Image (cartoon, grey):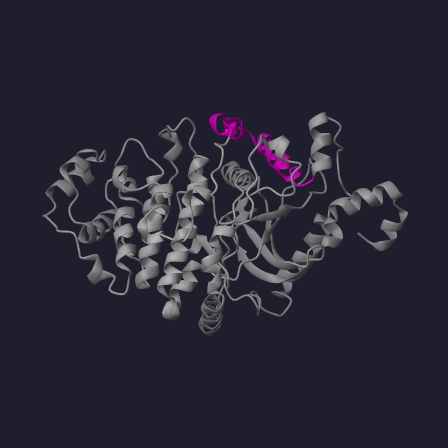
Amino acid sequence: MQNGDLRKKSAAEIDFFTEYGDTNRYKVLEVIGKGSYGLVCSANDTQTGEKVAIKKIHNIFEHISDAARILREIKLLRLLRHPDVVEIKHILLPPSKKDFKDIYVVFELMESDLHQVIKANDDLTREHYQFFLYQMLRALKYMHTANVYHRDLKPKNVLANANCKLKICDFGLARVAFNDAPTTVFWTDYVATRWYRAPELCGSFYSKYTPAIDIWSIGCIFAEVLIGKPLFPGKNVVHQLDLITDVLGTPSLDAISQVRNDKARKYLTCMRKKQPASFSQKFPKADPLALRLLRRLLAFDPKDRPSAEEALADPYFNGLAKVEREPSCQPIPKIEFEFEGRRVTKEDIKELIFEEILEYHPQLLKEHISGTDRRNFVHLSAVDQFKKRFAELEENGGENGSAVSSQRKHSSLPSPTVAHSAKIPSKDHRHTASSSTKHAVDVSWEVQIQRVYIAQRELNITLIYFCQVNIFCFTTIKES
């Protein structure tokens, strides 16, 4: 908005505009990522002084399935508020309710992700390993008490910063299970990365899936942290099963009998007898207590895996924190995801996404609920300004002449999310909670950025160094 336009507005309008401050609040800096979804730019939040990432998701209503996924993720990240879940700071108001097709989501900015940290883990210590695993399990405890299954946990979906802080991101495949009974439809679009996929998902093994699928993924990630490479890099389902049984041994007849996929069941039945591998030999530098817990996390039968809360109580974490103090979450109300159970139109999805945007604009949400909302927000929205700025940056390849920031050398951005606070607020119904300052929303569309290897390693070494310098964070997890 131009200064002249601002001077023409009434005092009331100026006050109202200032409340949201979209136009003047964010100073867009440069392009830090591009992908099929759109564009990501870094920006300064002039209100808080923080550096943030603003993700432009374009043409979100072109395909209903994509729009539904975006809606699902934004909802989850609003409803999940936890220090170990990435945060959505804000969603910019569109110019109008009727005509918008792009959205701009503001996230917290993280320096790296666990995939990049693992690639440069020369200086990681046993304390790092323990602290990393604790944070991931703590996030799972919170998510699972809300009946949320992430379903796509992998190192690239775990963000990291120089204080050894981890945050789960990318909730695009996450689902909410209601009444503790996920249906078949619930799982039909499961396409998570094979290397971190639980064996019961290799060929649709079990009739009832549980939170144990995420526990398995965390076990795979932890093993990768310990050895610096993926534990089960299968090329296909059969190869994946071969790698798993090479490490865990042949599963019991009881476990095999529960396999629903005929071909997979026959393959496992005919498999030669394998003995479990020695974890102490496979992970020679690891703490014996860490390996004991790892074997529990990687149990072939999901019934034998611990819950996240049980894993947090493992002797491996003795003295680290009190499990009972780690926050839980109230189950998510089914009404939040009622659209999943009916056929929805483009207009239905647009209305629902618009309502999610209004969660970050309390006064307008109040008007919307009361039926007095306005048709457009041309004086309130910064989207037109951002469109122009994003277009300029994209056309010029970034402010510094390159598609990737010279300061930010990693592509991992917080998947669309919002959530960090030392004190976890209780969950209420969405409209009741809308008056709170922020809502956890994990924005999870992965950012694709080209990197230069030397720059990658340089930043990762710096990250590891700061992790060591700031290892005191390891002892302060109780307060986080």
Q: Residue at x 85, y 54 (%)?
A: 3
Q: Is residue 111 above or below residue 11?
A: below
Task: Give the x, y percent position of residue 225.
Answer: 35, 60
- Residue range of the region highlighted in magenta in the rendering: 333-361
The residue drawn where x is 23% and y is 36% is 261
Where in the figure is residue 415, as x and y percent of width and height? 51, 50
Q: Nearer the viewer, residue 369 or 430?
A: 430
Q: How many marks?
A: 0
Q: Give the left or right position of residue 36, taking residue 183 as reference.
A: right
- Tell me: 246 left or right of 83: left
Q: Is 380 displayed left or right of 340 in the figure? A: right
Residue 449 magenta-drawn? no
Q: Main secondary structure of the magenta part?
A: helix
Residue 358 counted in the magenta span: yes
Viewer-side residue, 48 vs 444: 48
Q: Residue furthest front?
A: 319
Using the rendered image of the protein, determine whether residue 194 is visible from the camera's viewpoint: no
Q: Position of residue 52 (x, y in %)?
A: 61, 56
Measured along the vertical axis of the image, is residue 165 above or below residue 141? below
Q: Nearer the viewer, residue 175 or 452?
A: 175
Residue 43: percent from the left, percent from the top? 65, 59
Question: Which quarter of the figure has residue 39?
Answer: bottom right
Is residue 410 depicted above or below 342 in this figure? below
The answer to whether residue 303 of the structure is visible from this angle is yes
